[in-house]
Image: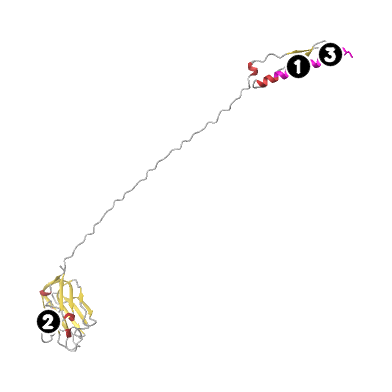
């Protein structure tokens, strides 16, 4: 079967279209491989007589095929913060220490002034019992009164001048040489008085003498005086009572 001229023209036209499409596809592929898509335009015109002719697009320049320019956005400014290291030095406060030395004042010792005075008594037992034995410095001897148990017995010490009387001591019969006189020959109480130069009492105290033998007694008047009077009451023996020693101390 011989194709008619109309069919031949149709096939030619189809072939021309296909060729144009192939060229377009090739141009498109080349643009892609060059780093960007390049559009290739071709104008296909059908020439009279049924043949197709292809008009190629103008050649693609380097500017046309250059890959699209990628605009890199400006980077954000980065603020660098430097940490400042602060060194703190410890401050040491030293407090001055004040040492205060205690001042010790040493008082001079009291002075025994017993021998500076004279003694008298309201009564005395016969024998070696008179008042002088109360100030002889010997605890084995004693002054002893001679009276009934209801009466008070006194012994008086008197100096010729005033003294700062610091202490008065009364020593009992506990060390008497006669063991029979050591107990049951004392008193129940004693009134101690300090008199000034005019005979007026400036200090006094009542001291109990419980037990037998009587306890030793120390009082501290700490006063200026001239005469000391001891008044004993509550005699333990029915006819006599006494003590061994009187000591008078003045402030040194």
Q: Main secondary structure of the magenta part?
A: helix
Ranked by sequence position, the earlier of labels 3 and 2 is 3
**Residue to which mark 2 is pinned:** 131
Q: CA distance from mark 3 to mark 2?
A: 187 Å
- Count the labels in the image: 3
For the point 68% across and 19% down, which residue is it? Answer: 30
Q: CA distance from mark 3 to mark 1?
A: 16 Å
Q: Residue furthest top?
A: 49
Residue 83 locus on image (x, y percent): 45, 37
Quadrant containing the N terminus in the rendered view = top right
Q: Dot 1: what SS?
A: helix
Ranked by sequence position, the earlier of labels 3 and 1 is 3
Residue 54 locus on image (x, y percent): 75, 13
Q: The magenta stretch spans which residues?
A: 1-27
**Is residue 29 shown to the viewer in this render?**
yes
Mark 2 residue crowding within 10 angstroms, few (<14) / some (14–19) / many (20+)? many
**Residue to which mark 1 is pinned:** 20
**Residue to which mark 3 is pinned:** 9
């Amino acid at each position: 079967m011989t194709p008619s001229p109309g069919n031949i023209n149709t096939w030619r036209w189809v072939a021309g279209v296909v060729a144009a499409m192939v060229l377009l596809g090739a141009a498109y592929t080349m643009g892609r491989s060059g780093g960007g898509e390049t559009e290739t335009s071709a104008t296909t015109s059908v020439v009279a007589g049924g043949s197709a002719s292809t008009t190629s697009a103008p050649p693609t320049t380097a500017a046309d095929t250059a890959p699209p320019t990628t605009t890199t956005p400006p980077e954000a400014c980065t603020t660098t913060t430097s940490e400042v290291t602060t060194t703190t030095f410890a401050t040491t406060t030293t407090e001055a220490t004040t040492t205060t030395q205690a001042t010790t004042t040493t008082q001079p010792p009291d002075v025994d002034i017993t021998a500076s005075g004279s003694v008298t008594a309201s009564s005395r037992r016969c024998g070696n019992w008179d008042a002088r034995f109360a100030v002889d410095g010997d605890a084995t001897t004693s002054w002893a009164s001679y009276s009934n148990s209801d009466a008070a017995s006194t012994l008086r010490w008197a100096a010729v001048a005033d003294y700062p009387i610091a202490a008065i001591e009364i020593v009992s019969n506990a060390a008497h040489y006669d063991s029979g006189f050591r107990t049951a020959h004392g008193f129940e109480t004693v009134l101690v008085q300090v008199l000034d130069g005019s005979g007026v009492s400036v200090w006094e105290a009542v001291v109990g003498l419980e037990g037998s033998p009587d306890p030793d007694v120390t009082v501290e008047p700490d006063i200026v005086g001239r005469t000391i009077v001891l008044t004993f009451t509550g005699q333990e023996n029915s006819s006599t009572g006494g003590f061994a020693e009187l000591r008078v101390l003045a402030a040194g």
